[in-house]
């Protein structure tokens, strides 16, 4: 298990699978399973049983399912395409993430 280079609210592009080429925001990172949950990506249909106590009507809903971290790539803030992530230290010694493609700092 390696340390993930993605964080919550990063914008990623899917590079493999049925949603290849689509972009979305990371909602949750699961490093122990090497998976990420991306907004509007890898949608699956979920059957819900009605529950009047919780005010749930029931039926079929669509929700995101986790996707493997190797199938997504961070979007370069300057170019808008997928890029690898590097690390660099600033002049005062604090680490920052950088896009390998353009060298831009990732917020």
Image: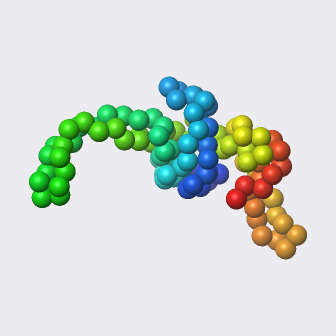
Residue visible at 47% across and 40% down? 40
Where is residue 93? Give x, y as percent: 82, 71
Location of residue 94 with respect to 13 vertically, above or below: below
The residue furthest bottom is: 92
The residue furthest top is: 18
Location of residue 87 with respect to 24 vertically, above or below: below
Location of residue 3 with respect to 20 vertically, above or below: below
* Residue in the foreground of this view, choosing between 78 and 94: 78
State the scheme by which the image is colored: rainbow
Where is residue 85? Give x, y as percent: 72, 48
Horizontal relation, residue 13 to residue 100: left or right: left
Identify the image quadrant of residue 97. bottom right
Where is residue 46? Give x, y as percent: 28, 38
Where is residue 25? Give x, y as percent: 55, 47
Horizontal relation, residue 6 to residue 44: left or right: right
Residue visible at 72% across and 37% down? 81
The residue furthest left is: 52
Please indicate, yes or no, whether residue 88 appears anywhere in the rendered image. yes
Identify the image quadrant of residue 74. top right
Number of on-image labels: 0
Identify the image quadrant of residue 106. bottom right
Residue visible at 61% across and 47% down? 11
- In which quadrant is the C terminus drawn? bottom right
Residue visible at 88% across and 69% down? 91
Horizontal relation, residue 56 to residue 105: left or right: left
Please indicate, yes or no, whether residue 35 appears anywhere in the rendered image. no
């Amino acid at each position: 298990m390696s340390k993930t280079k993605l964080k919550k609210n990063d914008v990623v592009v899917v590079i493999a699978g049925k949603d290849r080429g689509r972009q979305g925001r990371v909602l949750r990172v699961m490093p122990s399973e090497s998976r990420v949950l991306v907004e509007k990506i890898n949608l699956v249909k979920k059957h819900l049983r009605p529950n009047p106590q919780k005010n749930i009507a029931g039926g079929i809903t669509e929700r995101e399912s986790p996707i493997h971290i190797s199938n997504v790539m961070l979007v370069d803030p300057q170019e808008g395409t997928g890029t690898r992530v590097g690390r660099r230290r600033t002049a005062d010694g604090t680490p920052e993430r950088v896009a390998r493609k353009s060298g831009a700092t990732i917020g």
